[in-house]
Amino acid sequence: MAEGVAAELHTGGAGVFALWVPDLNRELREDTGRGLPCRIGELWLMVTVPSGLRFLACYARDYAYASGDALIRAAHLLLSPGAPR
């Protein structure tokens, strides 16, 4: 599995998909010591969120034989600096 990617899939069709996305301000914050906010590129959001949702939907359809509507909850969480990726 690729580094920074994790998935937890359940037989009932439920699942969780996590993907590490780079902070575009990290190097600038480390170099200058300023308290810059975390910044994520729009392209990362446009690609990763739908990709994760599609992965979960395909699993639910193909392996759990689920169909119909889906309840979706998405969150962006900031990792602490020493957290593994």
Image: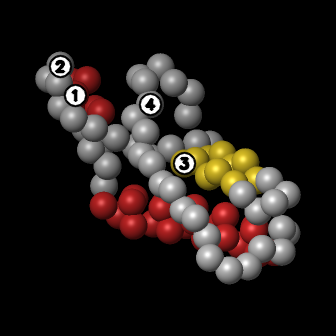
- In the drawing, what numbered circle is on residue 19? 3
Q: Secondary structure at mark 4?
A: loop
Left/right placement of residue 76 relative to residue 20 reads left
Confirm or deny contact between disc 2 and disc 1 (CB under 8 A): yes
Q: Earlier in the sequence, mark 2 or mark 3?
A: 3
Q: Is residue 38 left or right of residue 13?
A: left
The three-letter code of the residue at mark 3 reads Leu
Q: Nearer the viewer, mark 3 or mark 1?
A: 3
Q: Point out residue 20 in the picture as x, y percentages from the top left corner.
A: 50, 44
Q: Are marks 2 and 3 in contact (CB under 8 Å)?
A: no
The type of residue carrying mark 2 is Gly
Q: Please give the residue where the numbered disc 4 appears in the rendered image.
A: 79
The reply to whether dot 1 and dot 4 touch (C-beta < 8 Å) is no
User: Of label 3 and label 4, which has the lower sequence position?
Assistant: 3
Closest to the camera, between mark 1 and mark 4, is 4
Question: Of helix, strand and loop, which one carries label 2?
Answer: loop
Q: CA distance from mark 3 to mark 4?
A: 11 Å
Residue 57 in which image quadrant: bottom right
User: What is the number of the mark on residue 33?
Assistant: 2
Q: Is residue 65 above or below residue 38?
A: below
Q: Is residue 35 left or right of residue 65?
A: left
Say the numbered circle drawn on residue 29.
1
- Whole-percent x, y for residue 10 in the image: 80, 53
Query: Label 1 sits on what residue type?
Result: Arg
Q: Residue at x 40, y 35 (%)?
A: 78
- Kindly tell me whether residue 2 is visible in this rendering: no
Real-space CA distance between mark 3 and mark 1, rounded to the nearest whole angstrom: 22 Å
Residue in the image at 68% along x and 80% along y: 68
- Name which residue lies at 34% across and 41% down: 23
Regarding mark 1 in the picture, which secondary structure is present there?
helix
Mark 2 and mark 3: span between their CA atoms?
27 Å
